[in-house]
Image (cartoon, coloured by chain):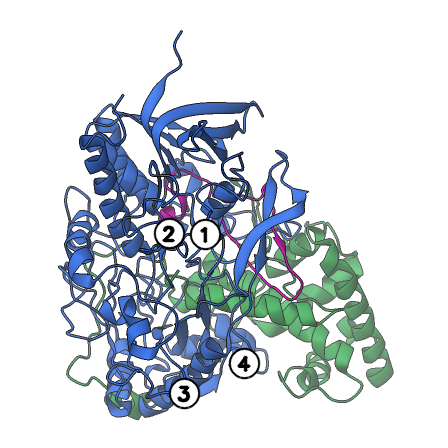
Chain colours: A blue, B green
């Protein structure tokens, strides 16, 4: 039997891989997709409206399980996260690396904030002299954003902000009491407070039902009322009959021929523990920023002794991440003793304070670039503020009830700057249970992003006070790197093959039939979230790949 | 990702705080027990409950503490919500929490003997309240009360968690979580964006 050769092998089924799979399959290409874990069943694997008292550990999980990745990796959804593949950190580095191994990846549980990158991001280097520009403009990528917005549905408003190009939107979330109060405070201080770009369906959209606003998005949506690849993209790919999806298939390395061109992928079948090879005329790596770089660095051959498509030495370098942290927490006295209100129907993505710094003059602040802030608060599922109160007894119990609608918190999202010292490589000694070298992280917050953190504490405190609120504190330190899940830069795109891993279309300079479709091609992480940009760039890369098939550059099966 | 709510960040904040308190880790981990095992509802029968971790004497103190922290008054409290059983299950499930709880309970009885000549559960309610009050301020532990201060706040965190993750606790707050709405819920006071009319009546 002749060995089967697919048109394209796609590693990963998250935002980048999912978009590639759907786009390629609809163009008639035969695709074999590899995913490190299994398919999820919303009824069993999502929270599925279970209450805390339905769970053995009230949703917070077994205290003996020490390896939790934090906020999303809880009793409701823990089976979706990968705990088998370790990573190491260089001395001085702290890193958290939650990896969702399930089909759909992190799109199953993502935060849904969906702002476009703009020219202020793409041409940031020209403005402030740091690093290099992206090899693309908003005008070029805008049509792809528009198509993605139509595909996934984003609730927001046209805002005419210089740092935030507008798109096409579903009607926005309604503002809650706390939004009106904080917006008034922001207005006094002179910073924006606007509806976030939230990929959560405020109305039925493209055959997907409207959100029912239960607020459990980050533990999985059982009706698919926000974008995830298993609800929005993979069914369309499967309908073409051009997709073969292999689950529990942990990609190990890209295979090459005698000329160093990609011929397929070797993966480990996690059920049989056997190594399997699958062949294609082109390969798309979309395993998420760090894992994609790890696979490429592990793809060593005679042609590519330092890893495939790595003649520039840039695979794994230039790692950027969003600094997250609680800039300020406090409460709004106006809301004390008010009836409870369903404030938590979209986690923290109803409103945002989009970047307002360094807009006119790139050096107007003590830092370059800029950050955004996500305000949050009101009645949450659990009254966490209670542990900050004094006392006990009936007065304590009454105070918890009185305070319940009033807490607010401001979360910063600030981009680290590209640096020589922030990167990942392969650990020379540690291997995962399948014998594959693991990722080793080297990362520290830079001075610029820490200035943003300090700046945000001051501005958010001013906003809260101007809103009539009471400031109670802020995070002692930012969250550790990796927390935001927004890492970028390990396979940056650019025109110069000596300095960049891929060209401006996400096609690697060294290996023309190897493409990268995730945030690793981004030059940095900007002040916006990454998912919608991963989708837009993946759509563009996929269409470039299809065009290359049409031109005969990669011959179809 | 942007959708992590205040509660999840707060959970990690507590984790971080707890990790710093070496002997009283508080919520050193994620887990808290409840009145359900799997899908089978565990009937709460305080009279016949056999603690899994605590001795009968220790359990009596834990029960009393939870009932003092979230009392039964005009609404049900920790007793009706089975919070003591919850804590017992939690501590039984968490080896790292066991030593702190045991030494804290020992400290509490020693402290009661020292100040009033009796074990904690033998004190009058007023005496118990007087004993706990100095421990109950978040940032103002008295010198020498460090162990007691940390222990009290650990018990209080477990009690708050056990109570407000129970069905009774949800009712206490009229907790709106996980309900369904046709439209995203909207502020009912848009005529007064700053909500000053509310602060006049409730401040």
Give the overall secondary structure of the magenta segment.
loop
In whole angstroms, how far apart are the C-alphas of marks 2 and 1? 7 Å
Q: CA distance from mark 1 to mark 4?
A: 56 Å
Q: Is residue B135 above or below residue B14?
A: below
Which residues make up the magenta segment?
A: A81-109
- Front of the two marks 3 and 1: 1
Looking at the rendered structure, the secondary structure element under dot 1 is loop
Question: In which quadrant of the rendered view does residue B140 lie?
Answer: bottom right
Q: Pointers 4 and 3 in contact (CB under 8 A)?
A: no
Mark 4, other Cα within 10 Å: few <14 / some 14–19 / many ≥20: some
Q: Is residue A397 visible?
A: yes
Mark 4 and mark 3 lie on one chain; the one further toward the N terminus is 3
Q: Nearer the viewer, mark 2 or mark 4?
A: 2
- Vertical side of A234 occupied by A129: above or below: below
Magenta stretch contains residue A86: yes
Mark 2 sits on what residue? A497
Residue A318's place in the image compared with A279, above or below, is below
Specify the label residue A389 is tagged with: 4
Spatial distance from mark 2 to mark 4, Cα to Cα?
A: 58 Å
Say which quadrant the N terminus of chain A sits in: top left
Q: Which residue is mark 1?
A: A312
Name the N-terminal-most of marks 2 and 4: 4
Residue A197 x, y percent position in the rendering: 24, 63
Q: Secondary structure at mark 3?
A: loop
Rounded to the nearest angstrom, the CA distance separating label 3 from label 2 is 34 Å
Q: Are marks 2 and 1 on the same chain?
A: yes
Pointer 3 residue: A366
Question: Which structural element holds mark 2?
Answer: loop
Label 1 Cα neighbours within 10 Å, binned few <14 / some 14-19 / many ≥20: some
């Amino acid at each position: 039997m002749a060995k089967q050769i697919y048109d394209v092998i796609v590693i990963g089924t998250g935002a980048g891989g999912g978009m590639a799979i759907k786009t390629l399959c609809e163009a008639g290409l035969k695709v074999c997709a590899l995913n490190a874990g299994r398919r999820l069943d919303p009824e069993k694997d999502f929270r599925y409206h279970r209450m805390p008292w339905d769970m053995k550990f009230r949703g917070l999980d077994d205290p003996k399980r020490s390896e939790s990745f934090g906020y999303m990796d809880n009793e409701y959804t823990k089976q979706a996260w990968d705990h088998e593949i370790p990573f190491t950190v260089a001395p001085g580095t702290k890193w958290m690396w939650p990896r969702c191994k399930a089909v759909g990846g992190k799109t199953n549980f993502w935060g849904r904030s969906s702002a476009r990158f703009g020219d202020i991001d793409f041409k940031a280097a020209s403005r402030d002299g740091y690093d290099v520009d992206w090899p693309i403009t908003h005008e070029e990528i805008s049509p792809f954003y528009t198509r993605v917005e139509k595909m996934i549905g984003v609730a927001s408003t046209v805002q005419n902000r210089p740092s935030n190009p507008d798109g096409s939107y579903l009607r926005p979330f309604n503002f809650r009491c706390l939004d009106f109060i904080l917006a008034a405070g922001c207005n006094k201080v002179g910073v924006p407070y606007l509806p976030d770009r939230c990929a959560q369906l405020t109305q039925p959209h493209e055959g997907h039902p409207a959100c029912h606003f239960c607020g459990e998005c980050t533990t999985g949506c059982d009706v698919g009322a926000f974008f995830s690849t298993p609800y929005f993209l993979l069914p369309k790919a499967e309908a073409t009959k051009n997709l073969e999806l292999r689950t529990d298939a942990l990609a190990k390395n890209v295979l090459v021929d005698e000329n160093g061109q990609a011929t397929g992928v070797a993966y480990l079948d996690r059920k049989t523990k056997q190594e399997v090879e699958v062949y294609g005329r082109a390969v798309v790596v979309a395993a998420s920023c760090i894992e994609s770089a790890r696979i490429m660095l592990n793809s060593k051959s005679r042609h590519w002794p330092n890893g495939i498509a790595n003649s520039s030495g840039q695979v794994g370098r230039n790692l950027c991440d969003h600094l997250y942290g609680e800039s300020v927490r406090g409460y709004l006295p106006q809301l004390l003793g008010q009836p409870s209100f369903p404030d938590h129907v979209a986690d923290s993505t109803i409103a945002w304070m989009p970047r307002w710094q360094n807009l006119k003059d790139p050096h107007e602040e003590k830092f370059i670039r800029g950050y955004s802030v996500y305000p949050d608060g009101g009645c949450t599922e659990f009254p966490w503020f209670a542990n900050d109160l004094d006392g006990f007894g009936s007065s304590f119990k009454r105070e918890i009830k009185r305070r319940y609608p009033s807490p607010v918190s401001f979360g910063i999202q600030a981009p680290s700057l590209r640096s020589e010292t922030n990167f990942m490589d392969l650990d020379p000694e540690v291997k995962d249970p399948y014998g594959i070298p693991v990722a080793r992280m080297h990362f520290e917050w830079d001075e610029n992003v820490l200035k943003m953190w300090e700046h945000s504490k001051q501005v958010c405190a001013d906003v809260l006070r101007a809103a009539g609120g009471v400031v109670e504190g802020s995070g002692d330190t930012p969250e550790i790197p990796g927390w935001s899940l927004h890492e970028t830069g390990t396979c940056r795109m650019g025109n110069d093959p000596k300095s960049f891993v891929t060209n401006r279309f996400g096609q690697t300079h060294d290996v023309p039939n190897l493409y990268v479709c995730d945030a690793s091609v981004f030059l940095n992480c900007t002040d916006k979230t990454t998912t919608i940009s991963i989708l837009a760039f993946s759509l563009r890369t996929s269409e470039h790949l299809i065009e290359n098939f049409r031109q005969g550059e990669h011959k179809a099966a | 990702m942007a959708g992590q709510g205040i509660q999840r960040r707060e959970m990690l904040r507590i984790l971080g705080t707890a990790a710093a308190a070496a002997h009283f880790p508080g919520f050193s981990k994620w887990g808290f027990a409840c009145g359900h095992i799997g899908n089978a509802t565990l009937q709460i029968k305080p009279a016949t409950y056999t603690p899994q971790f605590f001795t009968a004497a220790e359990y009596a103190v834990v029960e009393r503490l939870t009932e003092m922290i979230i009392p039964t008054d005009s609404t049900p409290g920790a007793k009706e919500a089975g919070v003591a059983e919850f804590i017992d299950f939690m501590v039984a499930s968490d080896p790292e929490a066991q030593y702190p709880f045991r030494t804290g309970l020992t400290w509490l009885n020693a402290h009661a003997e020292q100040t009033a000549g009796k074990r904690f559960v033998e004190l009058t309610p007023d005496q118990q309240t007087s004993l706990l009050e100095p421990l109950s301020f978040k940032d103002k532990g008295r010198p020498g009360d460090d162990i007691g201060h940390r222990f009290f706040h650990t018990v209080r965190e477990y009690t708050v968690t056990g109570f407000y993750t129970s069905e009774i606790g949800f009712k206490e707050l009229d907790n709106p979580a996980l309900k369904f709405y046709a439209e995203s819920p909207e502020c009912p006071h848009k005529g007064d964006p700053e909500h000053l009319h509310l602060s006049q009546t409730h401040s």
